[in-house]
Amino acid sequence: MSTTQPHGDLGTESLYRILIDTRNLEVNLFWRRTNYFLVLNSGIVLAIFYVTKSIHIRVFAAMGILASLLWFWACLASKYWQTFWAERLAEFERKNLTGLDFFSANAARRDALVAQGIGAEGVGKIETSIYGLAKQCRSVSFSMLLLSIVFALGWLALLVRPSREVCVRWLLK
């Protein structure tokens, strides 16, 4: 009687590729969703410049709030799955590909590699100062969450004070 692995005939390399592809799919889906909501919010902004009545501005502002809240929710859902698959990759590496550290490197190791790479670029003082900000890991997902909140707050302000002239004056400052 033969025993089989739960993953059947798939080898370590195939499983690793599946994990990477799934993680990459989640990252790509995040950007597609983010771009969709950014375009939707931008379209609503443009629509406001073509309406003149306060009630229409309020309707568009309410639509903008809804779109921004859905955007926020979609970003959270995407972050969940990105994190899940990144952790599965790291776990798989630690268990099956010891020492590879592509996805399983700890924060200190990642930061050291980034600092080393930035230091090796041989750029001037201004570039070094700016690139130095990249030595700390920052989340693009979090930036998109913040952008959705900024849009929601802007829509809320417009809902409270629906004036197209206020929008135009603010943009022209």
Image (tube, grey):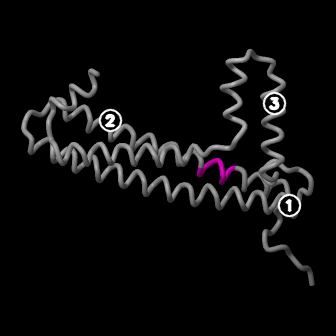
Residues tagged 1 and 2 counted as in contact (Cβ below 8 A): no
Which residue is identified by label 1? 94
- Residue 1's place in the image compared with 137, above or below, is below
Residue 45: percent from left, percent from top:
26, 35
The residue closer to the viewer here, 161 or 56, is: 161
Pointer 2 or 3: first along the chain = 2
Q: Tell which of 34 and 111 is nearer to you.
A: 111
Residue 148's x, y, as percent? 40, 46
Q: Position of residue 127 (x, y in %)?
A: 69, 20
Identify the residue at horizontal 79%, vertical 74% (top origin): 6
Which residue lies most toward the bottom here? 1
The residue at 42%/53% (across/down) is 72
Task: Work out which residue is located at the far top of the displayed protein and give it.
Answer: 124
Quadrant for the N terminus, please: bottom right
| Highlighted range, magenta | 21-26
Q: Any mark on residue 42, and which?
A: 2
Q: How far, Cα to Cα, is label 1 from label 3?
A: 24 Å
Of labels 1 and 2, earlier in sequence is 2
- Compared with 97, 168 (above or below) is above
Q: Position of residue 153 (x, y in %)?
A: 32, 47
Q: Amino acid at mark 2?
A: Ser
Please give the name of the residue rendered at 22% of the width and 31% of the height, measured from the top-left corner. 167
The secondary structure making up most of the magenta span is helix
Q: CA distance from mark 2 to mark 3?
A: 37 Å
> Can you identify the residue that label 3 sits on?
117
